[in-house]
Image: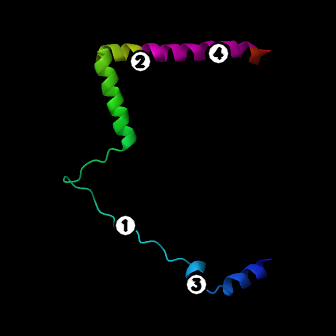
Amino acid sequence: MQKQRIAEVEHVEDHIVAFPAPRARPELRLANESDVSVVGPARRLQNDLAHAFAADAGWSVKRTVIVGLVFHAVILGSLAVAASNLVPHLTR
């Protein structure tokens, strides 16, 4: 099988098809103060949505922090309940 494959590669008429030329690599350089940061379309959309929702709802930083704390408290509470229900099953 391997001999057949070697023979096929050796008998290829067009060597460009058999061994394509390597792609040219872009030249690397160090960033300096004149370079601007690149913001992708996904990040731009995320920022636009965040500004739109914040402007429409009139959310403050305090309200955002409180909602975040409540969210994390609910998640941690549900994990604690799940862990407490797991302990009796492990001790049996």
What's the CA distance linking mark 3 and mark 4?
64 Å
What's the CA distance linking mark 2 and mark 3?
62 Å
Q: Which amino acid does label 1 sit on?
A: Pro
What's the CA distance linking mark 1 and mark 4?
52 Å
Q: Which amino acid does label 2 sit on?
A: Gly
**Are discs 3 and 4 less than 8 Å apart at CB?**
no
For label 4, the SS is helix
Q: Name the residue under label 1.
A: 26
Name the residue located 28 percent from the left edge and 47 percent from the top edge.
Answer: 37
For label 1, the SS is loop
The tag earlier along the polypeptide, 1 or 4, is 1
Q: Name the residue under label 3.
A: 15
Quarter of the image for residue 89 reads top right
Q: Name the residue under label 2.
A: 68
Q: Give the range drawn in magenta.
A: 68-88
Task: Note whether 87 is above or below 41 in the view shown.
Answer: above
Name the residue located 50 percent from the left edge and 77 percent from the top edge.
Answer: 21
Task: Note whether 62 is above or below 32 in the view shown.
Answer: above
Q: Mark 4 points at which residue?
A: 82
* Front-lying residue, 79 or 42: 42
- Camera-near label (3 vs 4) is 3
